[in-house]
Image (spheres, grey):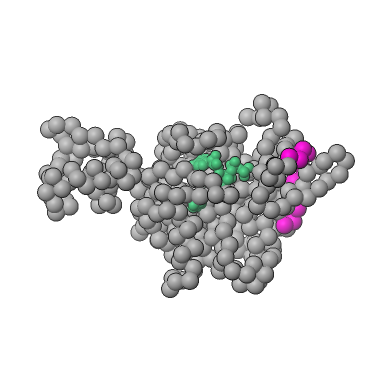
Amino acid sequence: MRTLLKLLGDGEFHSGEDLGSALGVSRSAVWKRLQQLQAETGIEVHKVRGRGYRLASPLFLLDEQVLNRSLNELGWSTQVYDSIDSTNAQAMRLIDGEVALPILVLSEQQTAGRGRRGRKWVSPFAENVYYSLVMRVEGGMRQLEGLSLLVGLAVVSMLRELGIADAGLKWPNDILVGNRKLAGILLELTGDPADVCHVVIGIGINVNMRSAAEVDQAWTSMMQQVGQPLDRNQVVASLSRHLHRYLGEHREKGFGAFHEEWEANHAWQGRAVTLLAGSTAIEGVVVGVDTVGALKLRIGDQVQVFSGGELSLRLRDESASG
Ligand code: ATP
Ligand code: BTN
């Protein structure tokens, strides 16, 4: 599949004969492979009599060699898939195997991309970044405190480096521009968090996503923000550099060293919000986060602290936001 995609990736016409000789198969076999490709990836291939086949729009594929070069410098290895159920699920499956950690799992598409609490992460082929870094964590709870919030800071730093200055965080794990979701973070843990465990840091970033009818909330992409498609290899390399740096400092200093930086990047700092906890709705004003990443809300004249995976924030004065 990858060879065929690489051949067609430039968005130019390629004759069935040329594709067949590059792949070492007949013209009718090329046609069958193209049918399969369309079915598996949702990519649109146009056929024009006398000219051949062309993709509806050019593709920028992940390049394992290019990625390995930048990630090896960080001491990470990479696995790049054309298609996988979920990069987080695959990263989890690697944990008890032979591979050296940390390892980064990337895929061109996810067939069962997951968000928090069993929600779906929409993951079209070759448009976005689906990123799961798996690593071993020793040293108890402190190494995990605020970790998913810290990852948000790395994503924001990458976005700034690549020209998107106005991205903000939404507690606990969303990256927004205005009120549109650009990226989400899902950490999954296995083992004993108080002793030795493994953590999968899952990050989904809308890079060049064109349309996504299935996303049931306002969303945006890096392409929409900068006005042109981006090279996803560059997005992965930049994100990895920033993440590597933040993880190193977090290991040494804990989240306490970052909570002010996090607040400075919180899109909803000082805003009136509703905190949803199952069927309970709590109204308050965002004060910030504490040194372990828990949310501080002013409720009446008291400040209360909230943490846990089942919590969701909503703005109360939605119409007033950007
Ligand atoms: P929270 O519950 O944390 O307040 P949320 O409503 O965004 O935030 P999450 O579980 O964090 O929920 O994220 C999953 C949701 O993200 C999905 O239900 C869907 O609305 C949205 N979503 C799914 N895929 C994408 C995507 N590619 N881009 C933007 N948003 C997406
Ligand atoms: C959220 O906002 O709910 C978190 C979304 C996390 C999506 C990423 S994409 C890479 C990794 N693999 C998954 O199945 N989920 C995460």
Expressed as whole percent of the image width and height from the top left, the position of residue 5 reads 27, 47
| Rendered image quadrant of residue 10 | top left
Residue 75, horizontal then vertical, whole percent: 48, 67
**Magenta residue check for 262:** no
Q: Give left or right: position of 160 versus 45.
A: right
Q: Residue at x 60, y 58 (%)?
A: 246
User: From the viewer's perspective, is 130 left or right of 193?
Assistant: left
Q: Residue at x 65, y 62 (%)?
A: 144
To which quarter of the image does residue 124 belong?
A: top left
Q: Position of residue 192 (x, y in %)?
A: 63, 70
| Residue 280 vertical position relative to residue 250 in the rendered view, above or below | above
Q: Looking at the image, in which quadrant does ligand 1 appear?
A: top right
Residue 91: percent from left, percent from top: 47, 61
Between 322 and 298, the residue placed more toward the observer is 298
Q: Quadrant of residue 54?
A: top left
Residue at image location 26% in from the left, 37% down from the top: 45
Furthest-right residue in view? 301
Whether residue 269 is visible, yes or no, is no
Say above or below: 222 vs 23: above
Tell which of 79 and 26 is nearer to you.
26
Q: Main secondary structure of the magenta part?
A: strand
Tell me if residue 96 can be seen: yes
Q: Which span of residues is magenta-colored?
A: 281-292
Q: Residue furthest top?
A: 319
Q: Residue at x 74, y 56 (%)?
A: 291
Question: 148 left or right of 233?
Answer: right
Q: Nearer the viewer, residue 303 or 14?
A: 303
